[in-house]
Amino acid sequence: MQPNYLCVFYGNHIDTLNIIYSLKKINITPIVKNESESARLAGFGIIDYQKKIYVHKDEFTKAEKLIKSIL
């Protein structure tokens, strides 16, 4: 991941979908990293179904406040 993007959330699929939807509503475009899916496609076993959400560093504070209000 480029240094201009920061991880704002790490968690399960349901919470990730809710956060992505909420971020898009306030015009923040998140990047979702799904290492489990990448591993599955490469033929490796899946350990967990956790996902990471990254946002641009300029939007990090705004995104973090939103996520705290959701969770």
Image: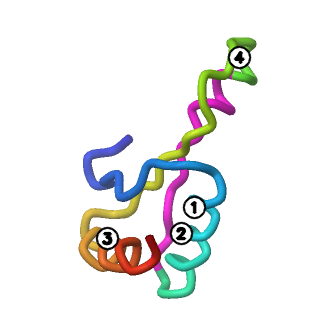
Q: Which tag, 4 or 2, sits closer to the chain's start?
A: 2
Magenta stretch holds residue 8? no
What residue sits 56% from the left and 86% below the top?
Answer: 25
Residue at image mark 2 = 19
Residue at image mark 3 = 64
**Secondary structure under the numbered disc 4 in the rendered image:** loop
Point out which mark residue 42 bears: 4
The residues tagged by marks 1 and 2 sit, at their Cα atoms, a distance apart of 6 Å
Q: Are marks 4 and 2 in contact (CB under 8 Å)?
A: no
Point out which mark residue 15 bears: 1
Q: Nearer the viewer, residue 17 or 70?
A: 70
What residue sits 53% from the left and 69% below the top?
Answer: 19
Look at discs 4 and 1 and give the one toward the viewer.
1
Query: Over which residues does the magenta segment extend?
Result: 28-39
The residues tagged by marks 4 and 3 sit, at their Cα atoms, a distance apart of 32 Å
Magenta stretch holds residue 31? yes
**Secondary structure under the numbered disc 1 in the rendered image:** helix
Identified by mark 1, the residue type is Asp
**Secondary structure under the numbered disc 3 in the rendered image:** helix
Whether residue 2 is situated above or below residue 37 in the rendered picture: below
Q: Nearer the viewer, residue 25 or 14?
A: 14
Whether residue 30 is situated above or below residue 6 in the rendered picture: below
Circle 3 Cα neighbour tier, 10 Å, few/some/many (<14 / 14–19 / ≥20) = some
Identified by mark 3, the residue type is Glu
Residue 4 in percent (x, y) is at 27, 54
The residues tagged by marks 4 and 2 sit, at their Cα atoms, a distance apart of 27 Å
Q: Which corner quadrant holds the N terminus?
A: top left
The residues tagged by marks 4 and 1 sit, at their Cα atoms, a distance apart of 25 Å
